[in-house]
Amino acid sequence: MNTTPSNIEPANGPDALDRDHKILLAIIKRYQLSIANNTTHSFAAQLFEDLREYASQHFARVEKVLTQTDYPDIAQHIDAHHLFSSELNRFQQLYTDLPGLFPHKAMLAFLNKWLTSRTSIANQSYRQHLEEHRDQVDALLGTSSTPSEESSGVQPPTPSNCAPKLRVLDDEHSIGQLICNVANTLGLDTKTYQSAKDFYSGYEDDISAIILDLHMPDIDGVEVIRDLAQRQCQAQIILISGFDGTVLHSAEELAVSQGLNLAGSLTKPFRIIELHELLVSLAGKRALEETIATPAQKKPEFTREDIEKALLEGQFKAYYQPQLALRDQALVGVEVLCRWQHPELGIIPPSEFIHIAERYDLIDTLTWGILTQAVTQAREWQNLGLDIQLSINISASMFNHLDLPEKILQLTQQHQLQPQKLVIEVTESVVMDQQVKALDSLTRLRLKGFQVSIDDFGTGYSSMLQLHRIPFSEIKVDQSFVLKMQTDPEAQAIAETVIMLGHKLGLTVVAEGIEDAATLAQLKLLNCQVGQGFLFAKPMSPSDFISWVQQDSKDNLPDFHLLSA
């Protein structure tokens, strides 16, 4: 491998296979650095070349050794190798298609997860097998241990002596002890407490993981969650409860909303294998953090001047996420989104700057700029034969201008875009902030032929009332429900209800956040008309969107076609 670090010395036998992981670790560290320095574009080609060489050499050696030493779980290892290669192919194809939008952080997370699974404590049976067959492995790899190595008792790398700390808070002593017994087999440093008071008396800032029972005699689990959030606890949290599943679900939502690191949950009585899988994940994650963690990159604090300069220089760009008819995979439209193309920091997502633009009353200027880009682009697409609708979100402050409908109509007429091709999206919170003015403007927009959509439906306090008051033509099922349809019965029930309600009211129903084929199939069964999500495509620049449309085939969209074709 042409980028192998010089400080990695040659190794023999089983140590040679561990050396492969050190090489992968070096690649990951350089990748982390390139992301931090915004140099991923120049590094990406070399990255894929290095990863393919790692996979080719390491996988061939491992499969040769395990096959000829009769390792009992070889099929599992080979499947993992195939999965790695498949994911690598997918990422490389994505980079080839959309280099400017490549998800480098997702790629890094994939590599980190792979390295964790290969080097975690959970992989000890594999390492033990290699040691038991060291002489045979040496011969298979064409190497042999030198006398000095044998006499000095050189061993393969072992996990850090600083074991991850697991603390268990459960009023049932037998449950707490059971958890500790399982965790001890994984090398975790464990303690169990039967009351919150005892837990607090022995609280340590460097705890790696906390298993918390919600039903405690003195201070219940929800109070503990609140206290841990106030302490800014960085430990991984696992919640357990024998109560109704809705209680556990609500506690999970509470923990996440308060910024805690929720690793999972267990419902009593739980199976040992479920507990073991969660603890293995914790042990491996901690091992990886100790090995490859780099100092967190502090997010820049943007100022009013930064936003004003970006507006003046045209750094805010319209991006487009396709919306497809779920029945026949036809492209019906795009949602218009905003991205900041910062000259030094690269692409910045809206979550980093929208609140600042709102704080300094710059959001209207930003929104008009993006809307103007989108309408202009739609006209250019129509000239190419691509006749689709645009959906764009409008901020609350824009309803302060009662001439909003006239201004939007003037913009569309200027670019010869029919009003019905533009969908104005508003969230329930926007409508509540500007009830009278929003009702005025949205009603007049509908009279002028524009469509009006209620976004994030079901996440507010009075969605049903707004549906009755305002002449919506479309309803969007919020992605917070769609993303959980396969794992959360409550989220599935809410999504089903919103779809049914949309049908009853004669509205077009759009589902956001479709990321897998199972969710797509379920939404089609529910007769949801339109969907968007990463399963289809991510938000794209205009040029990347045209390239996406012009692809001859899409692996996950075998029946894809243009509505206007």
Image (cartoon, rainbow, N blue to C red):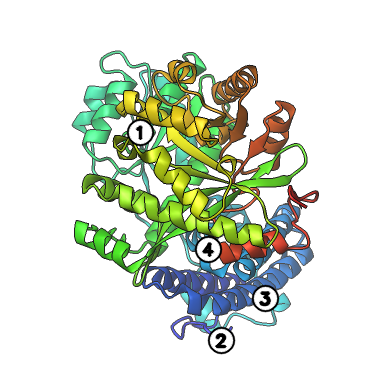
Query: Where the N terminus falls, by quadrant?
Result: bottom right
Residue depicted at 35% across the width and 38% down the height: 403
Q: Which comes before the other along the chain, label 3 or label 2?
A: 2
Q: Given this view, does label 1 or label 3 mark the residue nearer the observer?
A: 1
Determine which residue is flagged by label 1.
Answer: 257
Within-10-Å neighbours for mark 3: few <14, some 14–19, many 20+ = few
Within-10-Å neighbours for mark 4: few <14, some 14–19, many 20+ = some
Q: Which comes before the other along the chain, label 1 or label 3?
A: 3
Residue 435, by quadrant, is top left
Q: Amino acid at mark 1?
A: Ser
Q: Given this view, does label 1 or label 4 mark the residue nearer the observer?
A: 4
Q: Which comes before the other along the chain, label 1 or label 4?
A: 4
Within-10-Å neighbours for mark 2: few <14, some 14–19, many 20+ = few
Q: Is residue 561 above or below residue 405?
A: below
| Alpha carbons under labels 3 and 2: distance apart | 13 Å
| Alpha carbons under labels 4 and 2: distance apart | 27 Å
Front-most of 560 and 486? 560
Determine which residue is flagged by label 4.
Answer: 101
| Alpha carbons under labels 1 and 3: distance apart | 44 Å
Give the side of residue 375 with respect to residue 546, left or right.
Answer: left
Determine which residue is flagged by label 2.
Answer: 2
Q: Given this view, does label 4 or label 3 mark the residue nearer the observer?
A: 4
Q: Specify whether residue 501 is in view.
A: yes
Q: Amino acid at mark 4?
A: Leu
Q: Amino acid at mark 3?
A: Gln
Q: Is residue 205 above or below residue 551?
A: above
Determine which residue is flagged by label 3.
Answer: 57
- Residue 528: x and y in percent read 67, 30
- Tag 1's secondary structure? helix
